[in-house]
């Protein structure tokens, strides 16, 4: 008769990270927990960006704290880009060597008349394909052209191959929000641990990208 035991699998290490980024243009603190419950606590000085990052946390089921002080007396560019860098760095640090993760994720997110698709590979080979257009120059307090800068900065710093495409849509608010929600859902899948390959690097090379995740642009 086989003896029964109460052995339980070893607990996974906490996948949390904190990043501080200080330049002459911005001062940023980011804390992230990839295995959180979707709690967002975001203050960047740009209300619309705060709203989008709260969507990233909620729909990605990651806990995300962001504090940004930027040179908003100039414009929102440095604040937006550098916040993307810091969040990407925190995600990369929390992933470590990316052992056991699903690695790939994708999502289609409809929002009223808008449909956006995001495909993501946490490959450690950063690349952004951005096929998103706007009919307005501003949403709230942020220039719409800066959303591409945020996604570019995030992809670079997180070591992610990231394809974002709004397939159709008219309302600019819906377009942007569907992009962040689709990223959140794709990221939620990609960072999840695959129980069939826990402890394994998800690549035939034995490494992802061959190099540590980049720190992002200066």
Image (spheres, grey):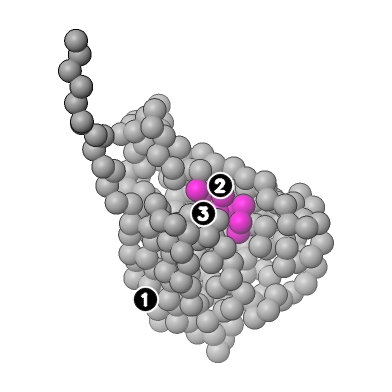
Quadrant where the N terminus lies? Answer: top left
Q: Is residue 118 left or right of residue 89?
A: right
The answer to whether residue 210 is magenta is no
Q: Residue 5: which quarter of the image?
A: top left
Circle 2 is placed at which residue position?
186
| Front of the two marks 1 and 2 | 2
Element at badge 2? helix
* Residue 100 picture location, percent across and down: 36, 36
Circle 3 is placed at which residue position?
60
Q: Main secondary structure of the magenta part?
A: helix
Circle 1 is placed at which residue position?
22
How far is disc 1 from disc 2 in space, using C-alphas? Answer: 29 Å
Give the residues in magenta: 180-188
The answer to whether residue 181 is magenta is yes
How far is disc 2 from disc 3 in space, using C-alphas? Answer: 8 Å
Q: Are marks 3 and 1 in contact (CB under 8 Å)?
A: no
Q: Is residue 204 left or right of residue 150?
A: left
Which label's residue is closer to the chain start, 1 or 2? 1
């Amino acid at each position: 008769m086989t003896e029964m035991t109460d052995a339980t699998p070893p607990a996974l290490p906490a996948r949390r990270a904190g990043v501080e980024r200080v330049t002459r243009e911005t001062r940023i603190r980011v804390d992230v927990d990839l295995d959180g419950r979707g709690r967002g606590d975001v203050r960047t000085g740009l209300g619309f960006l705060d709203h989008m990052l709260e969507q990233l946390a909620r729909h990605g089921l990651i806990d995300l704290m962001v504090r940004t002080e930027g040179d908003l007396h100039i414009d929102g560019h440095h604040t937006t880009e550098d916040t993307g860098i810091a969040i990407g760095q925190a995600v990369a640090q929390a992933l470590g060597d990316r052992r056991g993760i699903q690695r790939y994720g994708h999502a289609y997110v409809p929002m009223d008349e808008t449909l956006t698709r995001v495909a993501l590979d946490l490959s450690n080979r950063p690349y952004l394909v951005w096929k998103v257009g706007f009919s307005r120059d501003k949403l709230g307090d942020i220039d719409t052209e800066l959303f591409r800068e945020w996604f570019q900065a995030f992809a670079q710093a997180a070591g992610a191959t990231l394809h974002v495409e709004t397939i159709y849509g008219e309302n600019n608010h819906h377009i942007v929000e569907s992009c962040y929600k689709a990223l959140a859902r794709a990221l939620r899948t990609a960072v999840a641990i695959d129980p069939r390959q826990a402890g394994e690097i998800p690549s035939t090379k034995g490494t992802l990208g061959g190099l540590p995740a980049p720190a992002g642009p200066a």
